[in-house]
Image: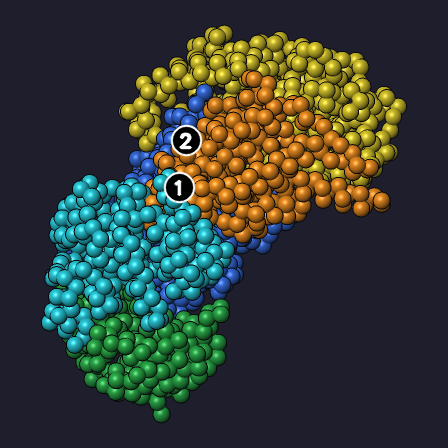
Amino acid sequence: MEKKTVTRAGMNRRTFLKVSGAAGLGVASATFGVPSLLRAAPKTIKIGSIQPVTGPLAVIGQGSRLGNQLAIDYINANGGINSMGGAKLELVLGDSESKPEVGRQEADRLINEGAVVLVGPFQSGVAMAIATLAEQRQVPFVMDVAALDAITQKGYEHVFRVFITAGGLVAGALKYYKTVTEAAGVHPKRAVVTNTADPFGKGMSGGFLKMLKGSGLPVEVVERIQYPLGIQDLSAEVARIKAAKPDIIFPISRIGDSVILLRELYKQRVDLMGIFGPGSPGWYEPEFVKDMDKLAFYSMTNVPWINPESPSYQRGNAAFLKASGKNLDTNSAYAYTGALVIADALERAGSTKTKDILKSLRETNYADHPVVGGAIKFNDKGDNTGALTALVQIQPDPDLLKRVRIVLPKDFAQSENIIFPAPQLWER
Amino acid sequence: MALLEINKLTKAFGGLTAVDGLSFEIAGGEILGLIGPNGAGKTTVFNCISGFLPPDSGDVTFEGRSMVQRQPFSICKRGLARTFQIVKPFPAISVLDNVMVGALLREPSVSIAQAEALNIIDFMGLKKMTRQEARGLPLPLRKRLELARALATKPKLLLLDEVMAGLNPTEVDELIGLIREINDQGVSIFMIEHVMRGVMALSQRVIVINYGQKIAEGLPCDVVLDNAVIEAYLGKEFISAQCT
Amino acid sequence: MNRLHLLLVLILAVLSGLPLVLSKYTLGIFIMIFYYAYLGQSWNVLTGYTGHISLGHALYIGIGAYTSVFLAQHYGLSPWVGMFAGGILASLVALILGFLGFRFGLRGVYFVILTIAFAEITRLVVSHIEVLGSFSGIFLDFDPSFRNFQFRGNIPYYYIALTMMVLSLAAVRLIEISKLGRFMVAIREDEDAAQALGVNTFKYNMIAIAISAFMTALGGCFYANYIFYLHPDSLFGMGLSIELILRPIVGGMGTLFGPILGSFILTPLSEVSRAYFSKGGLEGMHLILYGIITILVVLFMPKGIIVYVRQWLKPLIPERKGDD
Amino acid sequence: MLNVRDINVFYGDMQALRGISLEVKKGEVVSVIGSNGAGKSTLLRAISGILRARNGTISFNDRNITNAHSAGIVAAGISHVPEGRQVFPNMTVKENLEMGAQFPHMKKAATATIEEVYSFFPRLKERLGQNAGTLSGGEQQMLAMGRGLMSLPQLMMLDEPSLGLAPLLVSTIFEIIEKINQLGTSILLIEQNVFQSLKISHRGYVLENGTIALSGTGEALLENPHIRKTYLGL
Amino acid sequence: MGMDSTLAVQLLIQGVLLGGVYGLIAIGLSLIFGVMGIINFAHGQMMVMGMYISYWIFVLLGIDPYISLVAVAAAIFILGWLIQYTVVNRILDYPEAMQVLPLVSIGLILENAALMLWGPDHRSPQTALGLDSMWVGPIMVDTSRLIAFVLAIIITFLIFIFLKKSNLGKCIRAASDNRTGAVLVGIDVDRIYNMSFAIGAATTGAAGCLLVPLLPISPHIGHDFTLTAFIVVILGGMGNLLGALVGGVILGVAE
């Protein structure tokens, strides 16, 4: 935290200077939309980034914004867009405040400021509002993170998704669960599924339950527990979990409730073979790993994840660590990826015309990215056919940053050793 | 038949019986005064008649219809209007708009209601303040406004709760004239008043209550000589009675 | 027609012409200005004129949005019709709320809590109804056509929002000069005195809340077909309820032009501060500024900015005679 | 000891007091009479610092207390027993009395003062554990006066102490006022019971429309034809 | 004991224990409302400030939240004083609708100040007793909850005694009972209002400390706690302090 504050303060000053410089005329002209002359001269190409940098999702939004930014910095440092005479990229910033209407309005502002492509915005609801706007304004929109299947089901021409769909996420979860249990030769009989009752949590758990039922695996879901996002107490829920006597828990949770859930499981001494997150943002976040320490060990999560061996990751992570004191994680890495994909498309398009960018986005075949998965290609809906999830397990290591390890798929694995069943929480 | 009949009206607050089996009536065209010490239950009588308080028992009959359990607005619609002891003007709107609220009760057309309101404002001597916000008026004028508003509802019976309190003698005399004129137009009047000057000048009959019970009733000049009244209200030394 | 009317016509003419010169983004800001002015005006009918404070007006926006979208998705009903269905439903819900509040004489803080409770309960209920998308919310299909209340560009939305704002202004003006409006103001000023003058306060309270809810719900339909995404938390949440009352309060409650003025000040202000202070390292600064400015306005201009504007405009308003 | 010079008090734009001057000397009972709304209560509020005087001066024991903080005025030795009593309804009688002693020297004397108050008003002693809200009007008036005494005032200002009381009680209250005065406290009294109050007053002022219309000794005022006509109804 | 009854008892205990803390949060709200008739819409955000300060003390100095509680309460007391002095005192005579807005804005300012000061992360330090639990047969009693509950009861009791017995407490009661009367006996009512708001703030700050071991802190959770405190206060009766505690327990069990 301390390190971060320093960086923050540094940024403060810079931004402050910039802002005070731009004050006065700048404020008035840009806001009230005096047609921008800059658009005519493609010395810089503007990319609009809309992320939830304030409000409940600020932690993710700020990381994602930085991911977008660092990818662009990287391209610029390497000569910009060569096909357009080394034109530099510029990220113009928007804050969705986690509200759809604000996201839409911000996207519109960024388009007005000259953004030729949009990237963002983590939340599916905001993504939907921006997607429709992008379609209305005919500006390409690359979603870095946003999993809900429905967004790409509308048949929009201008919308692409780098992230995996919720359906893909669920399929990955089941596949890995099967691999883990079969390899260990242990088959949990009773399971509890918990999920936050938000679009993501409900969609994920619904899909997972359905797929689990059809899988023929010898596991029965004896309890499904839903609770609102942002809950502050899970003791009653965990008491119910304990009463259900599960062998395994499939939590679909965010960082806040993950912490509460894990502590309650410990305090109430719930007997478990393990914790397996089918798609659980939270269980691998650095704050979580640090604060939970031993309690976090051996939990497994299926997640679209970074590929630590890739050169792109190593480059991106170094920059990210320097700027924020944190490692690239799923969201920031995908944000990094999203901006890289855009740069690649611009490079091949050699033009900032929507038509050309769209054509080149559709022809994307981009492998030099920092995440687990194949080369990024978009199908006719705009979804990334190369997207893949990984199974990560938190394993003991004195170095906090080395605890989260990929265990599956084998091609990307950092650790051959999958620990399952795990020792009980209070016996570590 | 009397215009208003009060029959064994009783109202208690907690252990305190504010009005205790009170009966009296008001004839059409009459001016009746109600006097008694502070806390004797006078305002409670008004509140029970005008529907702001439900009586515990007893009946209030106006033109042969029971008013008990009716809402204040519906009692007002029947033709029984009141003023409040602590005046309740609509502070942020003009005198005209204040009076128009009353006028609109009987007159659906806003423009006709406005004309009527202006007439009443003129009659009450508030013409200069027509466009002024009510909250800016001094107390005597607010009292007049209160009366003007009630008058605008075209009542058959007006209940006046201490409209003369706080007025100087000249103003009291003016108001006496106005009330008499209102009465001459056929409006019956039932008034609570401490200003004996007003009570004596206007009332055709006076009721005196104390502890919620009637202790005297009759012509003003008879009532003030009544021993019970002197003891309870006017004071033993009647000459120096509480006549402010 | 006096000079003030002339000024209004002039402003309206300028606003009508703006789409010819402004960018789509700036039109977007104006749409939000009109939208929030409209909502503020709708809230003003209840709270500004009748004096009952509602902190749960998001409820009616949500009902309007969900009803029109539900009818469009499941019965193919045009939102142009569906919005009125939403309005009627919102009025019915408001009448239930009003019945509880007015029949039992809840005033001030207690009425506020009742309105919050209604909105929160509805939010929770909608969050559990599958056909309404439950927690996930509803994604609208983008199918631009006049019938569907959906358009490719901002210009149609601009004119719709402008029309809604102007109509709400006209409606409130009509109310203001009618018997209804005068009775509403009387209730606001002193409910007992109004009763004593024969005003059926319960009836007029109910009328006021029904009108207010109806108008607000129409705004919800507009929102749905402009944003294309409905979510119970953002549509029934207290955040929106508060957002909606900011503008009339800053502009001037219980006045005709207060909500509009407030929206013309606050909406661009939040836009500008977000655009210029939400950059790296300063996340959150714009909301702090927004907070400080609203506090300052309330502390130093408690009657709303409209009071000051009125003073500037005084030369334009003809003196009224005492006895016209 | 109390000296009011030419004060003007406004409510918003409305002038309530116009150039009022009056004086209370040590050991005196002074009455201010006048019709409702004449500005009597306003005068007391201005003296006790609840309202601001726009101009003019108020001095007490030769100290300027114009627009001083009301707590300072209590500390200086003026206590104001307001119209409508203004007791603390959810506190007990004893607590109400204790609240009257806000400053150290008052607190030090509080136990003794409470006994003194009980001797004036034995009824209060019977009800010392009862919440003030449950007292009758007369008892509340006694409590308000008792609370006023707790601040060991040199000057006690009483606003309509007999308002709404049964005649018998009215006499009692006036007797107690006289007793308090005899024990050395000056009294500034506002009353609508003009006769009784002038009878116990050394001097009196008549307030009409925010100005002093008349002043003089209690007896002289009782004989004044204007007073007899307007305020005594003779 | 059967399984269902074990579960029921377990839930009941958990609920009662948490309810104590809810009660403590609500007491501040109730006090402020009782004395000034103001609903503090920034209440939850003030609590979050308390949580952050407690967290900060823990991370920088290693002092457990249960111990830093006094310092945190003092800090939030000052914050409350400032809020009252700069804003709330000026809006006491405003119509209710106008009172809502500044307090909501203060909440917004505090929330975003926390965001700027501490960043958006969820923070959940591992305190000494954070994971402790005690067992009574099959029933688990969460130590941090128990401590929180006991401290909440003690603080509530202290406030109650303070209001009942101390001179300042009596002045607060007097000012809330009858403002004019309080002014007339020489109470500096403005100061009393400052005190009341500050004490109300301090209790919510203390409640925040008790919650640090139980749940992760992030800048935006304040609003939910404002709502929680609201519900508790309504259950317990506006302005009724002991009612707030009872309401807290009711809500804790109901959840």
Instruction: Tell me, yes or no, if residue B75 can be seen here.
Output: no
Q: What residue lies at 33% left-to-right and 84% top-to-bottom?
A: B216
User: Same subunit under labels 2 and 1?
Assistant: no
| Amino acid tagged 2 | Ile
Q: Which chain did the image draw in yellow?
A: A
The residue most toward the front is D183
Quadrant (top left/top right/bottom left/bottom right) for the C terminus of chain C: bottom left
Residue C77, by quadrant, is bottom right
Q: Which chain did the image draw in blue?
A: C
The kind of secondary structure element at disc 1 is helix
User: Looking at the image, is C96 positioned above or below residue C18?
Assistant: below
Q: Residues within 10 Å of mark 2 (few under 14, many from 20)?
A: many
The residue that label 2 is drawn on is C288
- Taking the image as shown, residue A135 lies to the left or right of residue A333, namely left
Q: Colour of chain B?
A: green
Out of A384 and A270, give the one closest to the viewer.
A270
Out of D177 and E186, give the one closest to the viewer.
D177
Q: Colour of chain D?
A: cyan
The residue that label 1 is drawn on is D108
Q: Nearer the viewer, mark 2 or mark 1?
A: 1
Quadrant (top left/top right/bottom left/bottom right) for the N terminus of chain C: bottom left
The kind of secondary structure element at disc 2 is helix
Q: What is the image's colouring?
A: by chain
| Amino acid tagged 1 | Lys
Out of B9 and C154, give the one closest to the viewer.
B9
Q: Colour of chain E?
A: orange
